[in-house]
Image (spheres, rainbow, N blue to C red):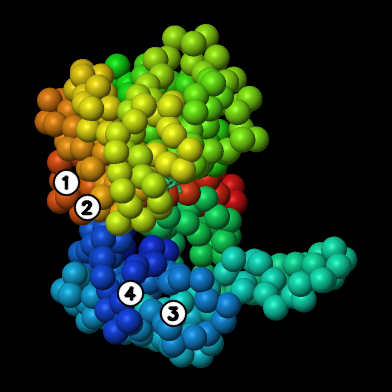
Amino acid sequence: MQSIDTYDFSGKRAIIRVDFNVPLNEKFEVTDDTRIRAAIPTLKKVLAGGGAIILMSHLGRPKGPTDKYSLKHIIAAVEQRLGAKLLFASDCLGAEAAEKSKNLKPGEVLLLENLRFYAEEEGKPRGLAEDASDEEKKSAKAALKAKQKEFTKALASYADCYINDAFGTAHRAHASTALIAEYFPNDKMFGYVMEGEIKAVDKVMQNPARPFTAVLGGSKVSSKITIIEQLLKKVDNLIIGGGMTFTFAKAQGGKVGNSICEDDQLDLALRLIGEAKEKGVKLYFPDEEVIADKFAEDANTKIAPANDIPDGWQGLDASEAAVAKWKDVLLSSKTILWNGPVGVFEMEKFAKGTDAIAKIITDATQAGAYSLVGGGDSVAAVNKLGYADKVSYVSTGGGALLEYMEGVELPGVKAIRGGC
Ligand code: AMP
């Protein structure tokens, strides 16, 4: 396997899959350039080594070419961070892209238009009738597969080497994230974002300094089962907050009022509690919640035990006292993983628990713990508070991070490490 640190880029064209799927406002300005900033070290390394760059990315979920999701909107933001001008190809396929990449000189950077303007990128047929038969779906998929091969081959033809630096899409076997690697058997490598993410997750999941504490929040147990099961094999302490709290509370005979609760997951919740006991993992739930009489910023609120919430009320945030009880366990941890908010942090009124967790994790980091924060919501909370530099690692990948932690071999990782 090649490494970006030792590869000779001199006179070569590197095609780099980046994750420039950044949020834009109504004036098409980039409102959060975290992902662009994250990619810059990789780009600078290639340019400093005498190479030229072809950048490819997706933006949003277009169903075909549309101005709204054009990557032209992000050119200025990339140029500003990179400190160099970009060339742009208004179609990732075709004569313009081929010509411009062929003529690239060392030090030049070409950005290709949104890959997802083509269904071939994801390999998912588009425009199928809702009532299409299985047979029709199958044949549409087969037809697209053949076109996907041509699409991938065309992208590969632009360059001499391939770098995957898009951890956010590494869990997808798309043309640009995995399939393209096949065309560069000896000239494929991870960029620094990918390398950093893999190293951070491996550090936490393979060889954590102990005690190891995970904080899991979010809305649903059902979407976090596999990760909870994986974590139970690894952690010493597991703090579960957010909407998941109430499925566990009800399973143990608690009253959860109108709180979000998955009645079909009660048995599972009990099984997970049993598994934790068996493995000697200490489980923590918020014992007290900020409860509200409606799901709104202007709701009336009060504090109640998380397992005794009156009808008509719902738990929307871990209370200050509840979070304070987790403080000692977090401060004495040597490894901390945080994924998911412990309240409806999108509303300022119910963001205090999540903010407090973020603060405690920065304190624990200062005291010597290794902390990994991942998942869009926890990362947003950390960024909002200006704590990104005060935790050990902020992951850019949501789904990819969870799948990697669940032990799934990500297609984007496998394509670089081994076969496709
Ligand atoms: P997930 O996508 O499963 O990680 O869940 C993230 C979402 O969980 C966020 O949008 C939060 O608003 C939501 N959430 C956290 N705590 C609660 C709660 N107590 N009740 C309802 N939703 C919650």
Please tell me whether mark 2 sits on a helix, a strand or a loop. Answer: helix
Q: Circles 3 and 4: CB distance less than 8 Å?
A: no
Tell me the crowding category of disc 4: few under 14, some 14 to 19, or many 20 or more residues within 10 angstroms, Cα based: some
Q: Position of residue 219 (x, y in %)?
A: 46, 43
Residue 165 can be seen, yes or no: yes
For marks 3 and 1, the one nearer the N-term is: 3
Q: Disc 2 versus disc 3: distance between alpha carbons? A: 25 Å
Mark 1: few, some, or many residues within 10 Å (few <14, many ≥20)? some
In the figure, 326 relative to 74: above or below? above
Distance between the Cα atoms at labels 4 and 1?
23 Å
Residue occupying the point 49% across, 86% down: 66
Q: Quadrant of residue 34?
A: bottom left
Dot 4 or dot 2, earlier in sequence: 4
Report the Cα–Cα distance between label 3 and label 4: 9 Å
The kind of secondary structure element at disc 1 is loop
SS of the residue under disc 4: loop
Q: Name the residue tied to disc 1.
A: 387
Callouts 2 and 1 close, C-beta under 8 Å: yes
Residue underneath mark 2: 383
Q: Is mark 3 within 8 Å of ligand 1?
A: no
Q: Residue at x 81, y 65 (%)?
A: 138
In the picture, the disc for residue 14 is none
Q: On the rendered structure, is 379 left or right of 417?
A: left
**Residue name at image x 40 percent, y 51 percent:** 294
Q: Amino acid at mark 3?
A: Tyr
